[in-house]
Structure formats: C-alpha cells, structure tokens
Amino acid sequence: MEEGKGRSESDPNRRVNGTSFSINDPENQRAKKLWTVDNVKAMRFKSLSAAKSFYRLYAAATGFEVEKQGSVWGENDMVVMRRWVCNRGGFCKKKKNLEKAKHSIRADCPAAFCVSLGYASRRWLVREFVAEHTHELGFKLCPQIYQPIEVEDYLTSLKDDSSTSYRSYITIDDAEAAISYLTEKKDSEPRLFYEVNYVNASLARIFFADSMAQLDCSCFGDVVAVYRTNSSDLHFVILFSLNHHHQTTILGCAILSDETVEAYTWMFRKFLDLMQGCMPLSIVTDGNKALGEAIKSVLPESRHRLCTWHLEKIASSIVDNPSFLADFKVLMLDFLSLNDFELKWKAMVENYKLSENPWILEMYRKRHEWAETYLRGHFWAGLRSTKVCQVLDGNLSRLSLHKLKINQVLSLYDSVVMKIRINEGKADYDSKYSKFTPSTPLVKMEKQAFDIFTRESYQRFLSEMQMEMFLVALEIDYDDSPCRKYILAKIDHEDLVYEVMFNPCGLTIECSCLKFETFGFPCSHIFHVLKSEGFKDVPHNLMHQRWTKSAKSTAQFWRNYLPPVSVDVVAGVMSYGRVVCSSSPMLYLGTQSEEAFKIVSSCFVKLKGELDRQDNSVLDVQDNKDTSSSSDWKIEQSGLWDYINYPYFEYVRTILAMY
C-alpha cells in the first residue's frame, strides 16, 4: 500500500486548528480512541503548519509540551522533513561548575512525531509517531493547564476584526448587555462575585471577580497593586498581585465611569467584601490622588507604596540629565541608613538646583511611600511597580477598547485572564517535574528548598545561598543571654557590616538587612549563621508559605465555604473555575455563524447526555460508600452547584478538542 493511504479522501472530517483528519466514530468517542498510533500514522496533511497544529493539539489534549527537534532541507531550501518531540526528551548534561548548574525537566522521553513531504501526492505523511512517555502526563497533574483553545489565536482574531464582527453580535443597550453577561456567567459559575452601582439611574460602576480570583485573594491578597487604563469614557481598573511563581495573578477588576474619590471608595469597599473584611498588608498604586484618598478611607491599615516605574518616568521629565535619574533611583531602590538618605537627598537637590521644584518638594514629603530606606522591613513580596500588569493591558489596549461595549470588554478580559492562568499552570508543572542539581556546598539545605519552593522561588532562594560564600564573620558576640550576635561583611568590603541576631532557644534569626521581612526569603547573612551554627536544614519559620508549591493547597478561602476536604478535592474545585473560564471563547465563537452554533449546540447536547450517564453511575457507587471518605468526589455545595466530579474534566477536554 502506498504510504499515507490509510484513509480515503471520502472519509468524514473534523477541523482541528485548520487540520483535517478522519473521525470514524459518528458518536464522537473520546479523542484518545481516535488518536491511536495506527490512526495517526495514516494521516495526511495539506501543509507543514497543519501537521504542527495537529501535534500541538494532540500534546495539549494529552498533557505535555512540544518542541521542534530538527528539519531536513531539500532543493530550493525547502523543508522536506520535520520532527517534533516531547519537551522532556533527552538528558541534562552534568555541569562541572556547580554555580552554573541548572535544573532540568528532561526525562529521556521518547515521544515523537515526524512528517515528510510526499513527492507524488504533495501531502505531508506521518513517518514516525511515538505515543509513549517516561513521565507522568501534565493533565493528570494539573488538568486545567492543557486546554484545546489557542488563546493567542483567539485574541489575534479579535484584534484583526475588533471593530466589525466582534462588535456586531451585541445589539441591546450597553448597560443591559453588561448585566446580562454577568448574570449568565454567574449561572455557569455560581461562585462569581460581582457588584454594580448606579448613579442617576445609569450604570456607573462594576466590580467582579471569578472563583479563581477569589482563591488567589486568599493566597496572595496580602500584597495588592492597582493598575489603571482608560478606554474613552471608561476606566478599567485591575487589582493584581504576584503568585507563588512570581507571576501576575488577577484578584479583581472594576469598570468605572469616572475617577473620583467616591468611585474608588466604592471599588475598594467591594474588594474588601471579596476579601471578607481582611485588609491587604501592602498596596501599590501609580500615585493617583483620588486613589490615594480612597485607600486612606477604606484601607487605613494597608501600607501604601508608589509605583517605581511611574516615579522614574516623572523624574526623567523633571531633569533632562541621565545622571539625575541614576541618583534618584539610588534613593528610591537602595536600602540606606536614615542619615545616608538625608545626605544623598540634600546633595542631589543642591547639585541639580531643585530646591524650589514642586515635585521634588512633594516627593520628600512622601518619602515614606517610595524610598526603600523607609519601606524596608514591611512585606512587599517583591512587588513595587504596577507595570507588571501591562501584559494584560497590552492585549486590551490593542483591541481598541473605546470601540467596544462593556460586556465585550468583560468577555475579552476573561479570555486574557485565561491566558495568564494557563501560564501559571505550566509553571506548576515545571516546578513539580524539575530535577535537582546541587549548586552549593550546602546540598541538604538546598535540596530541602528545592522540594518545598516553586521553581522560580527556589532560584531566588538559591541566589542568596550562593552569596553566602562571599561573607566573613568579623565578630561573634557571646553575652550572658542565650542570643548570639554575628557581625558580618562581604570579603574586601568590611566597611559595610550587617548584624544577625540568633536565638538558639526559639530558633529565631533576625538580620539588619531586613530582606526576609521584606521579600519573604532568608538573606545570605542568615545562611552564613545557619552554616556556622551547624544547621543541616533551614528552620521552617524561614520558609514563607506564600512561595511554596503548596501555597494554594492550604488556602484559607475554601474553609469559609466548604467542610474540611482533601487537597485533591480542592484541586477539583479549582479546576472547575478554570474549565468555565476556558470555555468562554468557544461559546463566543459558537455565536458567529449558524453553522458554528449548530456544531457547539450538538457538542453540548452529546456531552450533557454522556455526563448524565456517568453521573448516575458515579452516584450509584457513592451510595454504597462512606460519605466521609476522602476519595469521595461528591461535594455538597449548599446550592452553589450540585456536584463536581473531577474525572468529568478529562471528557470535557477531549470533546472540546474535537472541535
């Protein structure tokens, strides 16, 4: 048989990211039954990009990531063969230099997909397909990560047609459409939190946060930043923080018709309701006066910080001299003594003749809100700028928000947030499956941190640990008390000293640099004392829960709504929110044409029937089980939703992947 003729041209086809392949089961069986080795090897593709799209979709639905391994080039510099592999294939070479050693997720995985161009048919034929993996697949680890929806393609399609088709499907009044959108969203996601406010019988303010944002509030709401972007007469305000991977995570969003103190006061009150009355420890803003007044009124216990990026931008416009900006950044970012700060400030003002400058005078009055000298020792989680949220604003601004209605902005916002959460899921996967490679002599201590912290947090932990070898103890003070005081300095920099107090009774360590109190990671000075005192492990009081792999597993939020449940059940509830969010682009696309509507409707009818059949079988089994068992997936939700059965999500994923 000629290669590639495993199926005829008359076979029924489905479209997957532009790729045609045969679906022999009219009842839409699970995709894994379709993607057998024999079926895949029988496929033919019209283009190389179509083959790539298929394998990317297969990888997303199965639970791994793809990377290109190599290509073969023919005449006229044209690719005639290409091979893709699982990103966990191969081994990581051992580094002789421990300091340069990196941690790898390589697991010698053989999974591969290779296509070549058939010269007779001019179709791309499958030369090799290896489906086996040597590692646990990502969907089993974190099913909400691997979605069949291409977010970037979806956003691109909206951007290319933002003023036409995206706007044409809304025909009712803007305010009514927005309320309708949120109401319908709450029907599918009962835990959605949203509030609206009317002024003079007109919709003026909206605040909302989905179930995942509420979970993130409980985990990372201790430090909050406020990012503002304008859309003609609308003001889009995003409340965000940094998660345990040091990525942007969205806590809530508001759409305001004005930027008055009253508007921001209303927004923060709703955010406080979302936080169940718990004020954040710290909050970062761009210095908007109305925003600052609202914070003083609603969040008086929160420490306020001005965005460093905005201050740099203003400072560069005050004096057209790069050296001034450099001097100002030293005052803003370096941890100086109070005396050094005053001396450097005075010298800067005199050098650039700024003693009468209004902005300089105002900045000195507000120095407690922007200078590291005054902010150090308060927990900021490394967040000192609102600019990090521009990854979200960039997607929104490129779509010409002033041309969109409020409900369209809400839908677009959901899509972009989904992209952020997929990135978080991938970071979860990388953190679990990275392999440990020692980088310092403190191997046991380093391994402990590697097992507990996320990958990005571990790198920051490791950076401080590596700096420890450059320190020397100038003096160790043993007095009558059980505490010991270490005087440390860097080699060849003995003029700059740090004091570390160690109490062996309570295993408490405090350093004058205040890095642990500010960032949540032990400093190099603390590591030096731990090594000197003979510690093999880092005390748990120096392991900030916020930066660990289990940061979300121990969230306090769920305890206010659910009875005690296992971590696996909490993971299932978290997946519910992400599945709801990920399906919204498909629902939108299903309204763009009659044919698309029929496809989506048919898909959901079949899906609903299958889920009902599975639900009945699961409930029959559960009737014979102890309801207190930790393996019981049935969760009573007091009317929020009936049941969440975690195994269903795999079926949702495979059905959606077929379209």
Image (cartoon, grey):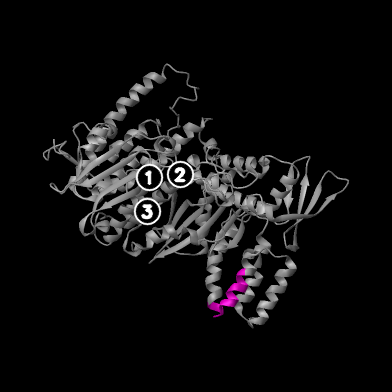
How far apart are the alpha carbons under marks 3 and 1? 12 Å
Question: Of marks 3 and 1, which one's residue comes earlier in the chain?
Answer: 3
In this view, the mark in front (3 or 2) = 2
The answer to if 119 sits in the magenta stretch is no
Residue 591 shows in this picture: no
Q: Residues within 10 Å of mark 3 (few under 14, many from 20)?
A: some
- Residue position for label 2: 212
Task: Kindly give the residue lying farthest to the right in the view shown.
Answer: 480
Residue located beneath label 1 in the image: 581
Query: Residue 49 vs residue 303: left or right?
Result: left
At 54% across and 80% down in the image, what residue appears?
320
Check contact, mark 1 vs mark 2: CB within 8 A.
yes
Say left or right for 515 vs 157.
Answer: right
| Residue 410 image label | 3
Q: Is residue 120 visible?
A: yes
Q: Position of residue 403 (x, y in %)?
A: 31, 63
| Element marked by disc 2 | helix
Q: What amino acid is labelled 1 in the image?
A: Cys
Which quarter of the picture shows residue 73? bottom left
